[in-house]
Amino acid sequence: MSPDHSERRSHVVMVEPALTQLAKLTANETHRLDRAIVAISVNPRLGTGVPGTPLRDYVDEIDGVRVIYYVTALRTITIVAYVEA
């Protein structure tokens, strides 16, 4: 019998607008955002779907971050389009 395995984390890629925003964040903001991105990579369904688009909107009220992203069809890559911290 094979052991139960948790889902594999998706690979996270940031597009240019997100990278530009990331460059403007402080070290503390980057750390908070990193936790949110790890959570999304483990469970890409965390965010709320944006109607009429493939985008998902994830807001972490505790850390005060927002990530807009979409996930590829096989859920192996999560593409981050927008970050806010």
Image (cartoon, rainbow, N blue to C red):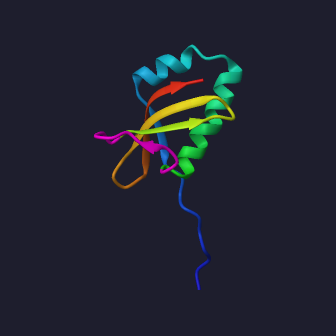
At horizontal 57% and vertical 13% (from top left) the residue drawn is 24
Quadrant of the rendering where the C terminus is positioned:
top right
Q: Which residues are magenta?
A: 45-54
Q: Position of residue 21 (x, y in %)?
A: 51, 18
In the image, 23 versus 54, the foreground residue is 54
Q: Which quadrant of the view contains residue 28?
A: top right
Q: In the shown orientation, is residue 27 left or right of residue 4?
A: right
Name which residue lies at 33% across and 41% down: 51
Query: Horizontal placement of 64 versus 23: left or right?
Result: right
> Which sits in the foreground, 14 or 44?
44
Q: Main secondary structure of the magenta part?
A: loop
Residue at 53% across, 58% down: 8
Numbered disc total: 0
Queried whether the magenta region covers residue 51, the answer comes back as yes
Residue at 48% of width from left, 22% of height from top?
Answer: 19
Q: Residue 48 in magenta?
A: yes
Residue 16, above or below 10: above
Residue positioned most to the bottom = 1
Answer above or below: position of 29 versus 4. above
Towards the viewer: 51 or 83: 51
Where residue 74 sits: x, y (%)?
37, 55
Residue 5 at x, y = what percent?
Answer: 59, 69
Residue 60 spot, x, y in % from top left = 61, 36
Indicate the quadrant containing the N terminus: top left, top right, bottom left or bottom right. Answer: bottom right
Q: Which residue is the extreme one toward the top?
A: 24
